[in-house]
Amino acid sequence: KQEVTQIPAALSVPEGENLVLNCSFTDSAIYNLQWFRQDPGKGLTSLLLIQSSQREQTSGRLNASLDKSSGRSTLYIAASQPGDSATYLCAASGNTPLVFGKGTRLSVIA
Amino acid sequence: SQTIHQWPATLVQPVGSPLSLECTVEGTSNPNLYWYRQAAGRGLQLLFYSVGIGQISSEVPQNLSASRPQDRQFILSSKKLLLSDSGFYLCAWSVQENNEKLFFGSGTQLSVL
């Protein structure tokens, strides 16, 4: 059974800092790995999707990487801004629907 | 473009009362549909998913049920709510492919008192 873990659970950084969020999964037989953003009391917004055959995806200041062999993915946020404050969740898709981690709550301090 | 509608946004219900949450998708046909629940400290839990009309898969045995009476309509129900049913309920859809990206509704905050 797929299990997804995100570390750290919470992170606070000063504005302008580059940061990395970590995600690990137990079953490497995935179709894709997705990163989402969730603002308080809101639904999830898809940020990046990495297919199992890909190593990374980029969108603006966001870069997500995937290493299936080690069961890890990272989300890199460059030049963080207060507007980046939110909870970031990763999810792995395999033979069953997406399995989510519990998320990392990010606070970017101005 | 595709949109997903979920309502109501907030709901306060007494224990033992029935529940009906509705979700509709526009701008696509034959989507996969999902109901998730997000409880504090427990992450996002998949409750039900559907690949077609009348086809429902349940991931977790519980006090809830789901139905898909139309292609783009997904309903979450309960005959008698429990305190433990409180949480943030999210509907989502995806294209029917293995590499699907998931799109979420805005969620319903359910408080059972």
Image: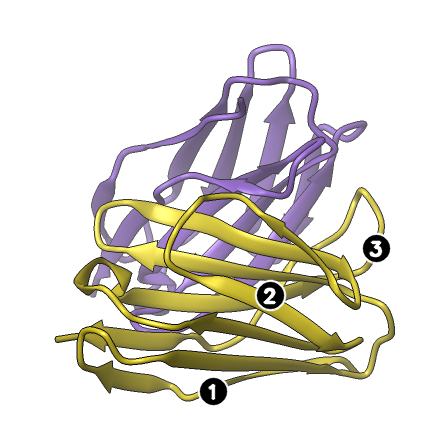
Q: Amino acid at mark 1?
A: Trp
Residue matched to label 2: B92
Taking the spot 63% from the left edge, 28% from the top edge, the residue there is A66
Q: Position of residue A78 (x, y in %)?
A: 46, 48
Is the residue at mark 2 from the same chain as the one at mark 1?
Answer: yes
- The chain drawn yellow is chain what? B
- Residue B45 in the image: x percent, y percent? 43, 48
- Residue at (54% x, 82% y) in the render: B22
Left or right of B78, for residue B82? left
Counting residues from the N terminus, which is met first, the one under dot 2 or under dot 1?
Answer: 1
Instruction: Give the side of residue B74 with respect to residue B16, left or right.
Output: right
In the rendered image, residues at marks 1 and 3 fall on the same chain = yes
Secondary structure at badge 3 equals: loop
Q: Chain of mark 1?
A: B
The label on residue B7 is 1
Q: Does any portion of residue A103 appear in the rendered image?
A: yes
Q: Do marks 3 and 2 share a subunit?
A: yes
Residue A77 can be seen, yes or no: no
Which numbered disc covers residue B96? 3
Q: Quadrant of residue A33?
A: top right
- How crowded pointer 3 is (Cα within 10 Å; few <14, some 14-19, many 20+) is rated as some
- Please name the residue shown 65% across and 82% down the image: B24
> Among the chains, which one is purple?
A
Q: Tell me the chain of label 3.
A: B
**View extreme (top): residue:** A69
Please state which amino acid type lies under the numbered disc 2: Ala
Q: Name the foreground residue: B44 vs B56.
A: B56
